[in-house]
Amino acid sequence: MEALLAFGAALLALRLGGAIAARWRVQRRPELAVWSAALVSYAIAAGTMAWGAAAGWSDPAFRVYYLFGGLLTAALLGLGSLLLYGWRQTLVPGLVYVGLAIGVAIAAPLHGDIAGTSIPEAQENLAFFPARLVAILGNSLGTLAVIGVAVATIRRRPLGNVLIITGVAVAAAGSAFAGLGAAETSVFVAIAALLLYGGFTARSGAAR
């Protein structure tokens, strides 16, 4: 059951990421491309949860999960928000962070035995520097960017921005309760993906 729930959450996040990518193909707005990448990252992380729940966790599976779920998703969401706000100069630093995150996920040494079907905890398998520090910075700055831009533009997009803030909160709660298991975390993933998609695609009051 845990594997099925996680797989369903992965399919949902992937479907929503694809829908935003389709909007990007029409509108060519960079924030849509970055948000699509964030949701695809979210989908890959959820898919890895499904794999771990069904076949057991391994070092490669944990690295994939940590890269896309722990390092990239929140950072890409924040970068998309900054691009929406007009801060195009953040694109290059954002891409540099993505490269750094990939390098950390590949090269950081793992400690302990990663096995079983429960989601491994980062603090038990990764040293604080650099892997966990990079994740903390990426998640913190990404979340602050999402919330800051949403608050700054809430009069223009009240419904969309409230959905985005709520989606980020649900995603953060899912990360906090990841130790409960794939089933519980998958529910958070699915709900957060729906909220974020609704927030990203909601039209402004002026557009309506």
Image: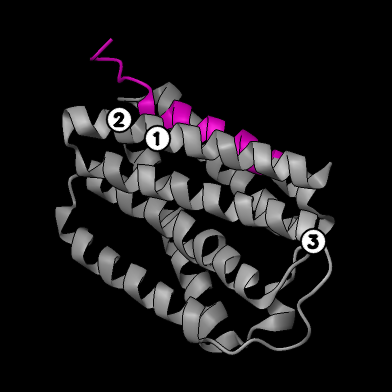
**Total numbered badges shown on the rendered structure:** 3
Are discs 2 and 3 less than 8 Å apart at CB?
no
Residue 200 on the magenta segment: yes
Q: Is residue 148 visible?
A: no
Residue 83 on the magenta segment: no
Q: Does 192 sit left or right of 76 as displayed?
A: right
Image quadrant where one finds the C terminus:
top left
- From this view, report whether residue 134 is shown above or below residue 47: below
Q: For marks 2 and 1, give the CA distance.
A: 6 Å
Return the mark for residue 22: 2
Q: Which residues are magenta?
A: 187-208
For marks 2 and 3, the one nearer the N-term is 2
- Circle 1 sits in a helix, a strand or a loop, which is it? helix
x 39%, y 39%: residue? 150
What's the residue type where badge 2 is placed? Ala
Local crowd size for mark 1, using a 10 Å CA cut-off: few (<14), some (14–19), many (≥20): some
